[in-house]
Image (spheres, rainbow, N blue to C red):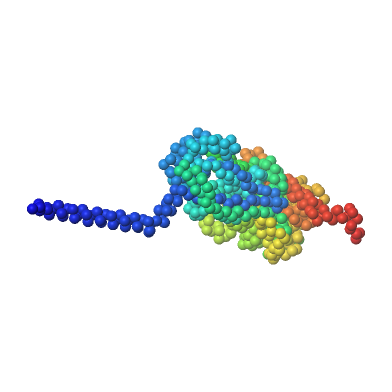
């Protein structure tokens, strides 16, 4: 008789059998789930280990002057690129790389920090602008540098270097804040405009990135290209600037420690030159400026990084007398025959306000007061017109407006008013404030661009000229509503400033017939002249240290008969206006000579001359 089976054994066997069946079902279910439901996800992961996507950076738009001269261009360059998928190996790869191509500790730290933020098979530029020798070394040691390859990129270059630095600006890698605000800026190697025109027109210059997809092997070397979407290049921009005039203005101003100038075409509002000195080389910035170069620029006492033409704020000085005259004439408190006796001073209460000419000017009318720059006449005219009328005319002609809305780091001047003083100084306006404002001192401030704009609007006989950095062609600007007889009187007096022997700019006049200039001189104090200094006859500042001397200013236009070019020149601590007069004279003369060259070399004029030489033109 067979031995009876143990019921406990049968129970265990049954349990194990059921457990095996359950495990097989779970395994099959999991396999089914992974294959059917999660298959695309894991396929994508596998592809991520096999396929690298690399952004194709767009070619940045180039900058041209009005004559199609390149001001900012893209030059081909080689760069070393790293795939950042295996982050635990990157530090070792960098150590090997730096034995071939030197990397500073700061560069290594920056690369490692950026690599941590990358995802999957992304790319990171290790070194840009490689020489051919460096490219050869990397290709020779390629087996020892997994994930590193050499590709062709572009480098932003500024051929003009110093003379266009403040205007054009430069490009550099975007900051973390910029990247947070725009995800496109996280692309490795993308450069953005930091200052100047590069930043002002950055959205137009930047273009739209594309991408390429590559298959890579186990050593993370590219096997083949799988897909590509081309990038869209940035827009080329043709500026109003005349590169030849810009270069010449820089040459003229470089004779001084610190200066700036702006030239505007009165017919179109186009800015032909905008220069600030001292300058800097913008080519230092696209690949990252060295600490040494940065420290030298930052610590320079003449602040070469500041665009003084747009962000320099100066007491405008005597050039505002032109607007005081217009305000008083418009208000009817003076006319062309009104005279004031100038003994060399005027009292407001117990306070004595001096004229720059100690012995005074005698009896003067408005014209003579302008071209001889009599302070006392304008003290009296300003008192009669009042600060409200003065402020309205100052603002109407561009002081306090800036001139180029949105331009990086550009500032606006200050036209003080009763409300402004009460808010900022917590005191009421008084007559002494009006007197100081009438000669462009006291609280009043303006930029060189604003002073050039004032001059352009006056020379355009009261049309509201608007400055432009792009070629605008001939525009019709609206009339601001001032009487032509008043404007003609002021423009005539500006002509006499430079062309009458007693005019303050006569010694620096343009002597070439038909090209004469008109204008207004200005000397702006940066320190108060004490009573003791006046008694000692020390009203000039040439004997003082540079930073205590007056600024020299000249605003002007040329030619006198038919104004075409308006200019403002500010020379810091020049000790007087005469250096600014000489600089403006040379610049206005150059602008007019360049215009003649353009005329005689134009295709139309060349054809007319050819036909005349062949007898093809009749006599009239």
Q: Is residue 484 left or right of residue 139?
A: right
Give residue 258's position: percent from left, percent from top: 64, 43
State the image coordinates of residue 502 (x, y, percent, origin top left).
77, 49
Q: Nearer the viewer, residue 459 or 237?
A: 237
Q: What residue appears at the point 41 percent right and 55 percent down from the top-left corner?
A: 41
Where is residue 389, by image quadrant?
A: bottom right
Residue at the image position 71 percent from the left and 63 percent from the top: 476
Residue closer to the observer: 236 or 552? 236
Q: Is residue 281 above or below residue 15?
A: above
Q: In the figure, 77 relative to 476: above or below?
A: above
- Across and down, in percent, residue 472 comes to 69, 58
Q: Which residue is more in the foreground, 285 or 574?
A: 285
Q: Quadrant of the C terminus?
A: bottom right
Residue 258 left/right relative to 173: right
Asked if residue 536 shows in the view, the reply is no
Residue at coordinates 64% horizontally, 53% vertically from top-left? 236
Kindly indicate the quadrant of the structure image that contains residue 266: bottom right
| Left or right: residue 431 compared with residue 514 | left
Q: Nearer the viewer, residue 305 or 49?
A: 49
Numbered marks: total = 0
Taking the view exactly as shown, the residue that stands out farthest to the front is 1
Which residue is pictured at 8% across the width and 53% down the height? Answer: 1
Residue 619 is at least partly visible in this image: yes
Residue 510 rendering spot, x and y as whole percentages:
78, 48
């Amino acid at each position: 008789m067979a031995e009876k089976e143990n019921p406990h054994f049968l129970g265990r066997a049954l349990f194990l059998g059921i457990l095996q069946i359950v495990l097989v079902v779970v395994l099959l279910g999991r396999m089914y789930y992974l294959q059917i439901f999660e298959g695309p996800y894991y396929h994508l992961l596998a592809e991520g280990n096999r396929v690298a996507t690399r952004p194709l950076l767009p070619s940045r738009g180039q900058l041209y002057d009005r004559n199609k001269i390149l001001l900012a261009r893209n030059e081909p360059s080689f760069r070393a690129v790293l795939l950042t998928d295996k982050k635990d190996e990157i530090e070792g790869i960098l150590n090997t790389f730096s034995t071939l191509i030197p990397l500073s500790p700061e560069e290594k730290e920056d690369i490692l920090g950026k690599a941590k933020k990358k995802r999957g098979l992304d790319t990171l530029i290790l070194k840009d602008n490689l020489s051919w020798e460096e490219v050869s070394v990397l290709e020779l040691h390629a087996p020892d540098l997994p994930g590193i390859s050499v590709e062709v990129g572009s480098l932003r270059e500024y051929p003009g270097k110093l003379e266009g630095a403040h205007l054009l600006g430069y490009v550099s890698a975007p900051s973390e804040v910029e990247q947070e605000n725009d995800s496109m800026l996280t692309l490795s190697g993308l450069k953005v405009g930091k200052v100047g025109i590069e930043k002002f027109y950055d959205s137009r210059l930047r273009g739209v990135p594309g991408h390429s997809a590559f298959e890579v092997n186990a050593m993370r070397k590219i096997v083949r290209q799988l897909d590509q979407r081309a990038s869209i290049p940035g827009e080329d921009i043709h500026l109003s600037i005349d590169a030849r005039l810009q270069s010449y203005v820089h040459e003229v101003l470089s004779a001084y420690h610190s200066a700036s100038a702006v030239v505007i075409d009165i017919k179109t509002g186009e800015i032909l030159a905008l220069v600030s000195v001292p300058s800097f080389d913008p080519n230092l910035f696209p690949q990252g400026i060295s600490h040494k170069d940065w420290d030298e620029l930052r610590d320079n006492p003449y602040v070469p990084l500041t665009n003084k033409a747009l962000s320099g704020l100066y007491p405008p000085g005597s050039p505002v007398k032109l607007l005081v005259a217009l305000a008083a004439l418009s208000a009817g408190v003076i006319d062309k025959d009104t005279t004031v006796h100038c003994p060399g001073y005027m009292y407001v209460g117990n306070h004595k306000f001096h004229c720059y000419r100690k012995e005074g000017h005698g009896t003067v009318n408005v014209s003579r007061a302008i071209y001889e720059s009599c302070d006392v006449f304008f003290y009296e005219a300003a008192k009669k017109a009042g600060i409200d009328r003065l402020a309205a005319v100052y603002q109407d002609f561009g002081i306090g407006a800036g001139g180029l809305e949105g331009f990086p780091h550009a500032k606006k001047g200050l036209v003080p008013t009763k409300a402004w003083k009460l808010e900022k100084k917590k005191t009421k306006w008084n007559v002494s404030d009006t007197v100081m404002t009438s000669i462009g001192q006291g609280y009043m401030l303006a930029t060189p661009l604003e002073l050039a704009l004032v001059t352009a609007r006056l020379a355009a006989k009261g049309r509201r000229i608007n400055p432009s950095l792009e070629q605008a062609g001939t525009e019709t600007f609206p009339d601001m509503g001032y009487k032509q007889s008043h404007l003609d009187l002021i423009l005539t007096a500006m002509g006499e400033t430079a062309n009458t022997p007693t005019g303050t700019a006569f010694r620096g006049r343009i002597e070439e017939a038909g090209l004469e200039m008109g204008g207004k001189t200005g000397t702006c104090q940066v320190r108060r002249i004490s009573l003791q200094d006046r008694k000692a006859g020390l009203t000039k500042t040439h004997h003082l240290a540079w930073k205590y001397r007056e600024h020299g200013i000249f605003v002007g236009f040329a030619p006198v008969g038919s104004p075409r070019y308006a200019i403002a020149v500010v020379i810091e601590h020049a000790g007087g206006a005469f250096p600014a007069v000489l600089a403006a004279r040379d610049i206005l003369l150059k602008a007019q000579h360049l215009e003649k060259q353009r005329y005689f070399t134009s295709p139309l004029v060349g054809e007319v001359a050819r036909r005349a030489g062949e007898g093809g033109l009749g006599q009239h």
